[in-house]
Amino acid sequence: MTDFINGLLGFRRGPWEMLASILIALGVVMLMQPFVLWLYSYSFVVTLVGTVMFVIVSHFRE
């Protein structure tokens, strides 16, 4: 866990890509759930933020 946090603070590619992937997956789950309307409403924004974040952090150093 401390390696993950140190990687985030040190702007390493691995932890940031994992966080971006989690955001993308969370956005897709929010899009597919039929119960809560506000989750569905924000699903596109969450997926978009995760995708843009993934593109940006793919240029970080390893």
Image (cartoon, rainbow, N blue to C red):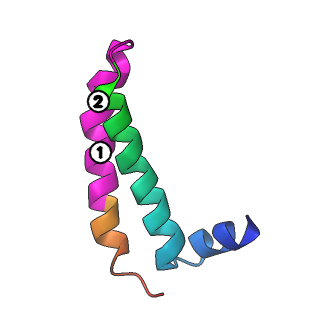
Kind of element beneath mark 1: helix
The residue identified by callout 2 is 31
Q: Residue at x 27, y 39 (%)?
A: 45
33, 16: nearer the viewer: 33
Query: Amino acid under label 2?
Result: Leu
Q: How many marks?
A: 2
Position in image of residue 49 (x %, y %): 31, 50
State the image quarter where residue 57 is shown.
Answer: bottom left
Q: Residue at x 50, y 75 (%)?
A: 14
* Crowdedness near tag 1: few (<14), some (14–19) or many (≥20) residues, C-alpha within 10 Å: many
The answer to whether residue 9 is above or below residue 61 is above
- The magenta segment is 34-52
Seen in the image, is 12 located left or right of residue 25?
right
**Secondary structure of the residue carrying numbered label 2:** helix
Query: Does residue 21 appear to the left or right of 28 in the view shown?
Result: right
Residue 32 lies left or right of residue 9; in this view the side is left
Q: Position of residue 43 (x, y in %)?
A: 30, 33
Give the image quarter of residue 6.
bottom right
